[in-house]
Amino acid sequence: VQLVESGGGLVQPGGSLRLSCAASGFTFRSYAMSWYRQAPGKEREKVADISNTGGFTNYADSVKGRFTISRDNAKNTVDLQMNSLKPEDTAVYFCNARLVLQYWGQGTQVTVSS
């Protein structure tokens, strides 16, 4: 099982980034997917959820209206489009797959700073 995140980096406040997570080794279309983040000294928090079919999404209040989660079950990928980024969005972002078991990626760093 592998979840590999990409797309992180340094961006100025107000900018955008698109994170992507490539999944392999399990039946991707059966799993709900999420993005989490963890800032230094803070607990990991869920940012966004998407159901296995992509029909349902949910967002943390802190990112609602700015972030969009999407998935492509043909390509086994889940993306997180992040707009209007703020310094408080700085964190390591993790991809998560869950059904009965949970799988995690290694994370990708997002830094929002001028």
Image (spheres, rainbow, N blue to C red):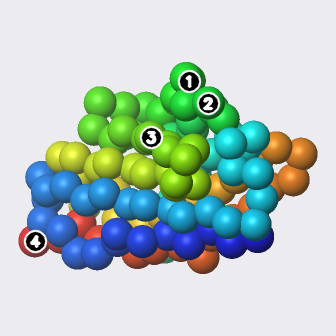
Identified at 14% across, 56% down, the residue is: 15
**Label 2 neighbourhood size at 10 Å, few (<14), some (14-19), many (20+)?**
few
Element at label 2: loop
Q: Point out the tag, 4 or 3, that comes first from the N-terminus.
A: 3
Relative to 111, say whether 48 is above or below.
above
Q: Give the residue type that dot 1 points to.
A: Phe
Question: N-terminal of the two: label 3 or label 1?
Answer: 1
Q: Sequence order check: which comes first, mark 2 or mark 3?
A: 2
Residue at 50% over, 69% down: 5
- For the residues bearing labels 1 and 2, Cβ distance under 8 angstroms: yes
Residue position for label 3: 70
Give how far across and how far down residue 26 sits, in percent.
77, 59
Pointer 2 residue? 53
Whether residue 15 is visible here, answered yes or no, is yes
Circles 3 and 1, Cβ within 8 Å, touching? The answer is no
CA separation, marks 1 and 4?
35 Å
Say which amino acid is labelled 3: Ser
Question: Which label number is shown at residue 23?
Answer: none
Please tell me which of labels 4 and 2 falls first in the chain: 2
Nearer the observer: mark 1 or 2; the answer is 2
Foreground mark, 1 or 4, reads 1
Residue denoted by label 4? 114
Q: Earlier in the sequence, mark 1 or mark 4?
A: 1
Residue highlighted by disc 1: 56
Say what secondary structure mark 3 lies in: strand
Quarter location, residue 62: top left
